[in-house]
Amino acid sequence: MSATNSFCKMILLLTAAIAGLIIATGSAAQGIAKGISPPPLAPLGPPPIPADNPQSPAKIEWGRYLFFDPRLGGDASTGCSTCHEPDQGWSWAEDISRGYPGTVHWRGSQTIINSAYYSKLFWAGSSTSLEAQARAASKGGVAGNGETDIMEARLALIPEYVALNRTIFGTEWPLLRDAYRAIAAFERTLVQRDTPLDRYLLGDRTALSAEQLRGKQLFEGKAGCIQCHNGPLASDENFYNIGVPGVKRWERDGLAQITFRFELYAKGVSETLYRTLKDDPGAYFRSRNRWDMGKFRTPSLRYTLYTAPYMHSGQFDTLEEVVDFYNAGGVAADGRTTAFPETKSPLIRPLGLTELEREDLVAFIEAFSGEEILIEKPELPPYAPLFTRAQLQAAQEAK
Amino acid sequence: MGVRITNRHHFLAVIMGTWLAFSAQATSVPDLGPLPPLQYNKTKAELGKRLFFDKRLSGNAGIACATCHDPTQGWTQNQPLSDGYPGNGHFRNAPTLINVAYKKVWNHDGRIGTSLDDMVREMITEDYIMNMDMRIMQERLKQDPRYLQMFRDAGYGEPSNGKVRQAIPEYLKSLTSRNAPFDAGTMSAAAKKGLQLFKGKAGCIQCHNGSLASDGRAHNTGVPENFDIFLNPENHQAFIAFALFQGIENQMNLKRDPGYYNVTMKQADMGKFITPSLRELKYTAPYMHNGMLATLEEVVAFYNAGGGKDRRKSPLLKPLGLSDDEQRDLVAFLLALSGDPLTTAEHVWQEPYPAEYATIEDWKHVRN
């Protein structure tokens, strides 16, 4: 077979694949239009555990320490829990997350609870595993701002970690790669499967109030939320622009303006876009397709009772505001909306919900959350020197 | 402004320097002498000065170049081991930056031999020094109207990483010795006797020669290790991070600073360090790559004893048999190589920096 021949074959295959894709998307949209039902809400099962990172008590234990340890960040001040505070819904209760010292983030912090179920992490779904996500978080300039060398050096100087790592991963000195695995294992324990909704779906008819039951009907019917917030996680993990306005702070906060430009620059958009964008292009960063501008991954609605404010830009303080936003067809109360109206989902349109219906819907969203998950922060083991003075003296003598 | 040409000059100078050093070994060494004046662009240097003292050039905006290269402490820190980036310590003594623009290789182990541009990048980005993502730095600078103006005035256009790495070296060229008694011809009688010893009986000139009093080469003098590097985990983590980054094997077991070995990876170079300049010592105690010698008297006593203990020690070092008087004279001469402290507004940025970043008004409608 000649090279040209196989090249032609490849083109053919590609064309077929693209055509298939168009048909698939087309039919999905049609399905919804025709009223073919999306996957129903369902009780949450156990989280998937990747074959190459099985859970073990020691691994989870180390991951719990590491999650709360600020030494896993540039200046040893900013660890995972710094921005994912258990008593702030394992997220950060501001529109945009606090950043590494000297910076502010540019998106809202997300809850860790149930993050184990996603196959695409971050608001724009840019990471595909918790392991990879942890790496991105600890290194990102406005997040952990840590470098591998110094973080690995620190791990080696914490005897408890050296010992834990040795029993779990078998290497003499901890590798950062394995530390991320341990963090992911710990995160896979942070799940909530006993919400009122789960209990209801498992057969406890008393688990939802009358109000919530009416809200459920709206969710699955008139309000159309189920089109995207479906399945056990209440997320289809697809990307949509639902009209969320950008971060208001960008207009009046110099520090936030710096991060906005940095993100555009670091994620590598064209010079023209770098100069002209005034909102977060979301999924566009990965796909480079203009029709992905302003699209974000459908988040789960689980645990949202504790994770205000809402949306990637944290522009809504309450679930009521969120429902009002949807009711207005994806426009905030002050009239603000996405800077990319051309990519906005046709599924988002004014809903005409009455005040009572809006209350019912909010009551139902609250059924996606159980008890608040709070744990005691572990006491972190200290550094200790690797050598004794006598050993150093001996080495000096031997020079 | 003629940056290319300057670079080419540097390149030639490196080659020349190496060649000179070789021939010096074979025949005689270059004499001590005055430093040739350095040309630099004042507007660019002024920008470099503001950058040098600006904490916003570090990752967490907590430290500036001047934190470790402090003008009131001889452009170093008067402590054995330099501070590190917050969260860690360091494992070496910060060198003074006076006359640094005359050098051809930088750092105690000489691992940078290209340009001050590269040296500055290392300082800004290294995780245990300033830990700065330069892309964030660039956007910070663009948020400061004063910088926008200064970069324009310097002919640099918009603030950028590359231009920062040009402006700071331009400023470093302004940090040069002035009015040292040795240069001004005002040495005391003791210092003059010391100079004779330096060139003769004490043999210092073998390595400390030329106008910087440095041959720019690596030697093993047997300076003892500073155990604080290894007993203090804050310092040790910086050392391990350095060794990991440099690819030095057996990092976790190393109990000594490998020095020039890091550059050649040859055992013979273990424990060698680049001969430092002897100018401005009056302000820069303590001494040696790890600050193990507190005073110049101690340094001279160290050499008088034939240096430290190391089986790879330079054969040029032998017990000198200097009398107490001779040792005092030698110290007097070393001090005569120090000039005025560079601590006025001419070299030090004295205006405050804004406490907060300015807001870009009408943000939605102006270009980023």
Image (spheres, coloured by chain):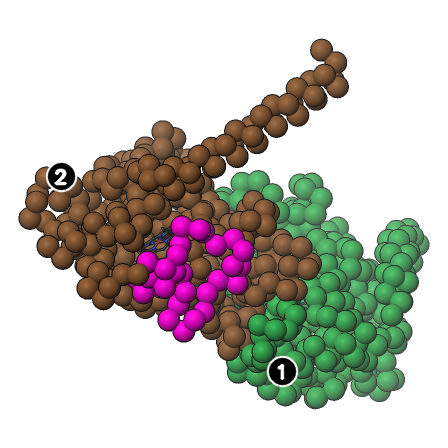
Image spot of residue B24 (x, y percent): 90, 56
Say which mark, if any, is on residue A27: none
Question: Horizontally, is A353 left or right of B246 in the view?
Answer: left
**Residue A249 in view here:** yes
Q: Amino acid at mark 2?
A: Leu
Residue placed at 40% from the left, 54% from the top? A348
The residue tagged 1 is: B72
Label 2: few (<14), some (14–19) or many (≥20) C-alpha neighbours in 10 Å: some
Residue A300 versus residue B40: which sits nearer the camera?
A: A300
- Residue A19: within the magenta? no
Q: Which chain is green?
A: B
Query: Quarter of the image containing the N terminus of chain A?
Result: top right
Residue B302 versus residue A143: which sits nearer the camera?
A: A143
- SS class of the residue under badge 1? helix
Q: Colour of chain A?
A: brown
The residue tagged 2 is: A202
In this rendering, the count of numbered labels is: 2
User: Mark 2, chain letter?
Assistant: A
Q: Amino acid at mark 1?
A: Thr
Label 1: few (<14), some (14–19) or many (≥20) C-alpha neighbours in 10 Å: some
Q: Which residues are magenta?
A: A323-351
CB of mark 1 within 8 Å of CB of mark 2?
no
Residue placed at 57% from the left, 66% from the top? A278
Above/below status of B176 relative to B82 = below
Residue A125 versus residue B353: which sits nearer the camera?
A: A125
Whether callout 1 and callout 2 share a subunit is answered: no
Residue placed at 87% from the left, 70% from the top? B1
- SS class of the residue under badge 2? loop
Question: Horizontally, is A264 left or right of A324 in the view?
Answer: right
User: Mark 1, chain letter?
Assistant: B
Image spot of residue A299 (x, y percent): 36, 50
